[in-house]
Amino acid sequence: MARKPLRDLTMEEQLARGPVDLPFLMLLLLLLGIGLIMMFSASYASAYYDSSNTVRNDPMYYIKRQAFFSFAGLIFMYIVSRIDYQYLRPLSIFILGFAMILLLLVLIPGFHTVRTDGVKRWFRSMGPIPSFQPSEIAKVALVIFFAARLSKRDSEKKKRFTNRTLTGRTLNRLEKIGFLELVPYGAVLGTILVLVVLEPHMSGCILIMVGAASVLFVAGIHLGWFISAGSLAIAALTYIVFNTKYMTNRINLWLDPWTDPTGLGYQTIQSLYAIGSGGLLGLGLGKSKQKFLYIPEPENDFVFPIVVEELGFIGGALVLLLFALLILRGYWLALHARDKFGTLIIVGFITLLAVQVFLNVGVVTNLIPNTGISLPFFSYGGTALMIHLAEMGVILSISRQIQAPKKD
């Protein structure tokens, strides 16, 4: 089909063809490029010494796959950035339903990967479809669904019930304090959290709650509800943590990883050695010593210690500065988005990115207990990388329309 000339396009179509935000795009590409280089450096030795049927001592194994997913993800990001994000409004309920179906399926034997610890958070690889975590899709779906619903919050009329009955008066009071408004959001969020807890996947629960809370907060939900819900969430997580064996072990190891230096505390200790040995300027790109089978799977969650070991404190700080600039630019785009829907989506996605970076760096420096959260654009994982780039594509799509007057 021939491309319509600009003069024949509607205002919505013209806005969707506007330029993307270049500072955000440049920061994103810079982080992705550095991430690929550092993931290659971190994974080279472990892949070389891995004689499994999958890797077969191929030092290029991880980088070839990550580069492929990066290229595919960039193409997908570009396509998403060219699509008007307003189409996500009617699709939000279907995206959420699809995510819930995946969360249910992964709990069924035969669909999830088999692990000795009983964790069922990964879909097993099926033909051309690689293994992935449905919770990654769920957190994106929840942000889009909440943003689509809450963007119309200011234009919706409050429900009114008769004051002639006790039930009616009670409902009116609940409506006045905003409780009834939160019921559908609480039901959706609670359902997803229950499914993720059954996997179990506590780090996934944390990210899902943070994404949902950020959208609700910016939409104008009263602060008191966050204090109440936050207290309940902390109490529930505390109960689950101390009644789940593998999570209790993580807490104990966080407090003192040297209690099991050759066992479960080994990875954390080697991570601290790597960070400490990097010094101010690092050992040099590709010259890490801890990646030679000291840090288990350094290409995944513990890639940042290799970054600091090779590039030093200054290199690690620059990487974190780039993340900070990307996050700040994202929030700037949220403030200048054309409508509330765009604002809420950006806030949700950028908050997820910010929290994930904080949690990953916090874990490898032993600031917080091990959460199993990867470092965006750096850690190995094709599906997660493509989802991150798809989120960035939506943000770039929204950035095309920031010149337009705001609307609800």
Image (tube, rainbow, N blue to C red):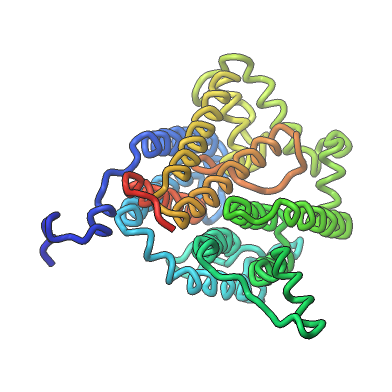
Q: Position of residue 140 (x, y in %)?
A: 53, 59
- As drawn, which residue projects farthest toward the top? 280
Asked if residue 175 lies left or right of residue 237, the reply is left
Rendered view: 336 above or below 167: above
Rendered view: 304 above or below 335: above
Query: Where the N terminus falls, by quadrant?
Result: bottom left
Q: Position of residue 220 (x, y in %)?
A: 61, 54
Residue at position x 39%, y 37% in the image: 29
Rendered view: 234 above or below 359: below
Q: Position of residue 45 (x, y in %)?
A: 55, 36
Q: Nearer the viewer, residue 227 or 77?
A: 227
Q: Nearer the viewer, residue 15 or 381?
A: 15
Asked if residue 259 lies left or right of residue 188, the reply is right
Query: Where the C terminus falls, by quadrant?
Result: bottom left
Question: Can the viewer see residue 179?
Answer: yes
Residue at position x 72%, y 67% in the image: 179
Q: Quadrant of residue 228?
A: bottom right
Q: Quadrant of residue 3?
A: bottom left
Asked if residue 135 lies left or right of residue 6, the reply is right
Q: Position of residue 357 (x, y in %)?
A: 60, 40
Residue at position x 77%, y 53% in the image: 230
